[in-house]
């Protein structure tokens, strides 16, 4: 009878457990699915030496790819910013066919920016030892590659540094060689290790992206009201950012910014005051439509933050 009661209790627990799991899934914050926009600045090489084929351009290109592959970010490339600005200037000056070029103001904005600086690089070669058996000798050498990179993550709205990290990577490349001697005749060969310089870049970027993830989590996701049409509130952000119908946002008005009269620097953006909440009703690629659920009607330029 005792065993029967235990079995009965296990069976009765399944519906409760299933309900709890469903509730837990619904309770997860929706921000996990929203992509934050991040700009990638060109990587600077300030180290005195070079290592293998690693360049600042190679690191920037792979960083853009790896950030995009995470699925957590919408990456805005700044590598070719000068070229894009020149194209916009040509269009604004009427030197391109009407409607064929980019318009001023079409450049994508970003919430964060990452900038990497290579501060130290070292390539050290040495013998790896050898062993001889009569006319046969086996030996080789090894090369140690070391690279250190500073990572800086900025809030693009304020220009302030959100966080920094110093990441390092080291790889050892071994080159095996062997030979057989018969009098003056010698036959030899060599075999190198794998792509060590490529492995260094992957190690550096793994740590750099971890630093971005940490600051991204602390920053949160925010956008702004860009237009109001009747009872429809339009915010910047759409399907490409991971927004979904039914998501709810708090709306904030901004206080007066405090600006240094001499330098023009924004010292304080002003306090945010929550004025209401909205719910997304329709999602496009770059914008989303919402309606008020409570509070006062927002104005163009009001900040919106995701409600967890």
Image (tube, rainbow, N blue to C red):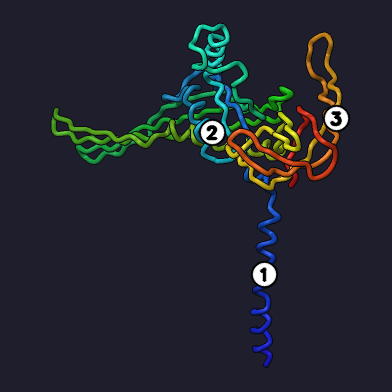
SS under mark 2: helix
Q: Which residue is mark 1?
A: 17
On the image, the x and y values in percent for residue 300 come to: 76, 28
Q: Which residue is mark 3?
A: 271
Q: Nearer the viewer, residue 155 or 152?
A: 155
Image quadrant for the N terminus?
A: bottom right
SS under mark 1: helix
Is residue 209 something one can see in this rendering? no
Callout 2: few (<14), some (14-19), or many (20+) C-alpha neighbours within 10 Å? many
Image vertical order of residue 16 relative to residue 69, above or below: below
- Residue 286: which quarter of the image? top right
Q: Nearer the viewer, residue 234 or 71?
A: 234
Kindly give the residue lying farthest to the front in the view shown: 230
Q: Which residue is mark 2?
A: 204
Tag 1–tag 3 contact (CB < 8 Å): no
Q: Nearer the viewer, mark 3 or mark 2?
A: 3
On the image, the x and y values in percent for residue 131 come to: 30, 39
- Residue 42: which quarter of the image? top right
**Mark 1 vs mark 3: which is more N-terminal?**
1
């Amino acid at each position: 009878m005792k065993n029967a009661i235990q079995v009965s209790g296990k069976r009765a627990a399944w519906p409760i457990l299933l309900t709890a799991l469903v509730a837990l899934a619904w309770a997860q914050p929706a921000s996990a699915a929203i992509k934050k926009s991040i700009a990638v600045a060109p990587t600077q090489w300030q180290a005195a030496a070079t290592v293998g084929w690693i360049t600042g351009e190679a690191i920037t290109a792979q960083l853009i790819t790896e950030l995009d592959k995470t699925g957590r970010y919408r990456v805005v490339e700044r590598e070719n910013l000068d070229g894009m600005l020149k194209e916009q200037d040509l269009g604004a000056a009427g030197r391109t066919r009407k409607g064929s070029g980019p318009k001023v103001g079409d450049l994508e904005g970003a919430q964060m920016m990452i900038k990497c600086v290579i501060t130290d690089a070292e390539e050290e070669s040495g013998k790896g030892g050898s062993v001889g058996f009569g006319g046969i000798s086996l030996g080789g050498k090894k090369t140690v590659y070391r690279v250190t990179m500073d990572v800086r993550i900025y809030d693009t709205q304020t220009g302030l540094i959100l966080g920094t990290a110093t990441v390092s990577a080291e790889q050892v490349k071994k080159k095996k060689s062997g030979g057989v001697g018969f009098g003056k005749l010698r036959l030899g060969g060599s075999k190198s290790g794998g792509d060590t310089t490529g492995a260094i870049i992957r190690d550096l970027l793994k740590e750099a992206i971890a630093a971005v993830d940490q600051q991204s989590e602390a920053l949160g996701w925010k956008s702004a009201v860009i237009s109001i049409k009747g009872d429809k509130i339009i915010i910047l952000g759409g399907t490409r950012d991971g927004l979904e119908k039914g998501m709810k946002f708090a709306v904030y008005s901004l206080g007066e910014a405090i600006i240094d009269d001499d330098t023009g620097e924004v010292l304080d953006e002003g306090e945010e005051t929550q004025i209401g909440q909205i719910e997304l009703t329709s999602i496009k690629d770059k914008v989303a439509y919402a309606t008020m659920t409570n509070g006062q009607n927002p104005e163009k330029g009001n900040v919106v933050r995701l409600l967890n």
